[in-house]
């Protein structure tokens, strides 16, 4: 019986295949069209690249091509992508500071 649910990339209710992401040790539900197109969920791509360093200076050329493919798929401009990267970096920094302040007085074992 086919697994019908929203595709993690295009969001359409279709038969999906759970597959490993190119972004690391995580899997997503891809419809055949998105799987064949080689795209990744946009928010996951933003989060992944926000950890990689300065964009585009620190990004390998093959990854720049991969990002361009995804931006075209999602109809996003490079400027919008850069804004989304800044938001992700700010959220990550905020979350890190919050976690660090909560564990400041922790005396447990590792």
Image (tube, rainbow, N blue to C red):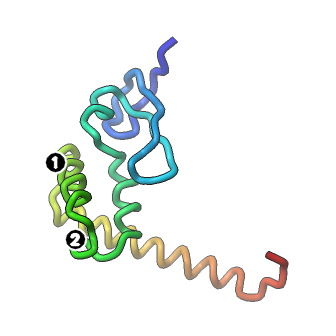
Tell me: residue 101, above or below residue 4: below
Residue furthest right as drawn: 108
Indicate the position of residue 13 as horizontal and vertical percent values.
38, 25
Quadrant of residue 82 within the rendered picture: bottom left
Sequence order check: which comes first, mark 2 or mark 1? 2
In what quadrant of the picture does the C terminus appear? Answer: bottom right
Indicate the position of residue 100 as horizontal and vertical percent values.
63, 82
CA separation, marks 2 and 1? 16 Å
Tell me: residue 20, above or below residue 84: above
Residue drawn at the location 39% of the way across and 33% of the way down: 30
Quadrant of residue 29 within the rendered picture: top left
Mark 2 lies on a secondary structure that is loop
Q: Crowding near pointer 1: few (<14 within 10 Å), some, many (20+)?
A: few
Quadrant of residue 35 within the rendered picture: top left
Residue 56 image label: 2
Tell me: residue 62, above or below residue 74: below
* Number of marks present in the image shown: 2
Q: Nearer the viewer, residue 102 or 72?
A: 72
Residue drawn at the location 27% of the way across and 28% of the way down: 33
Residue 49 image label: none
Residue drawn at the location 37% of the way across and 68% of the way down: 50
Query: Which residue, given by chain and number where applicable, does mark 1 sit on?
Result: 72
Tell me: residue 90, above or below residue 107: above
Q: Crowding near pointer 2: few (<14 within 10 Å), some, many (20+)?
A: some
Indicate the position of residue 76 as horizontal and vertical percent values.
19, 53
């Amino acid at each position: 019986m086919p697994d019908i649910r929203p595709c993690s990339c295009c969001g359409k209710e279709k038969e999906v295949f759970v597959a490993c992401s190119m972004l690391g040790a995580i899997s997503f539900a891809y419809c055949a069209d998105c799987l064949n197109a080689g795209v990744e969920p946009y928010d996951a791509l933003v989060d992944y690249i926000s950890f990689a360093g300065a964009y585009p200076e620190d990004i390998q050329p093959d990854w720049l091509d991969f990002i361009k493919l995804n931006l075209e798929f999602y109809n996003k401009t490079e400027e919008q992508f850069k804004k989304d990267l800044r938001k992700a970096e700010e959220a990550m920094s905020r979350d890190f500071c919050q976690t660090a302040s909560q564990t400041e007085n922790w005396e447990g074992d590792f």
